[in-house]
Amino acid sequence: LCSKIGRVMQGWIASFSFLALLGLLQTCTGSEEAHPTIDLPDVTAEASVEGMGFHRLYVLSGKLPISILPEYQCRIQISLTYPKELFFNPDLLSLWFNEEKFLVYSKESINTELHANEAEEGKIDFFSVISDENFHLEVPVHFRYQPPCNWGDTRLRTGPTAHALLLNCSKKALGGDRVISEKCWAGSSKKCRWLPFTLSLEDRSKEYKALPCGKKWHLVPVVISTIALTSALTVYFTHFIVTSSIKQ
């Protein structure tokens, strides 16, 4: 009798274990369906610098090769590395954007008055929530003052030298071995999982641009005139002050 009871109990335990394992597998499968994994291919984008003079617009636009829905709660990070000949002003950008577009993050403080020969390469990050596969960044970019030249303007072939585009989705899992850990938002210390893109970029931002510059042959006359005028005014005011003191 005891052996029969034992065999019945073992059968129940085995059946229960099988059902529990089956339920666990169904739960895991359902979780994968609720948060499907995506692994995006490369994305094509266009970049350009529009306008004239020292203050222009940098434009970067493209389309992700996959459908992005609002319920996925996705956001992108666009990182730009730019040469010393130009700069992005984070203070101006914070006024340019509102919270529904992009947030701006820069580790370095930007000295907007530096000459091109004194500046260094910089980096700036833009964060934005996206509800579909299209992205479009349009921001002011500024060229620094150039060294004196012979003809009154100088021609530069320069633009941001490196572009990075990252995708993060709270409600859609990101797959593949390319996923990296980066800050979740502008200025945040928390890390999130981001999927980086390899951009196939049609870059027109490096087309030649004409910028005003001081003429070299003006340098000597301007220096001589400045010294002469400063000396004359110094003598005049000194004479005026001495004469006034004597009369008193």
Image (cartoon, helix red, strand yellow):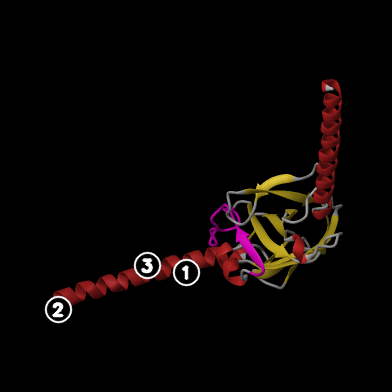
What residue is drawn where x is 66% and y is 60%? 126
What residue is drawn where x is 20% and y is 75%? 243
Dot 1 and dot 2 residues touching (CB under 8 Å): no
What residue is drawn where x is 37% and y is 67%? 231
Residue position marked by numbered label 3 in the rendering: 231
- For the residue marked with disc 3, what is the amino acid? Ser
Q: How far apart are marks 3 and 1 (CA)?
A: 10 Å
| Secondary structure beneath label 2 | helix
What residue is drawn where x is 86% and y is 30%? 11
Which quadrant, please, contains the C terminus? bottom left
Looking at marks 1 and 2 on the same chain, the residue that comes earlier in the sequence is marked by: 1
Query: Which region is colored magenta?
Result: 100-119
Looking at marks 3 and 1 on the same chain, the residue that comes earlier in the sequence is marked by: 1
- For the residue marked with disc 1, what is the amino acid? Ser
Q: Mark 1 Cα within 10 Å, few/some/many (few <14, many 20+)?
A: few
Please give the label number shown on residue 225.
Answer: 1
Residue position marked by numbered label 2 in the rendering: 247
Residue 149 spot, x, y in % from top left: 65, 62
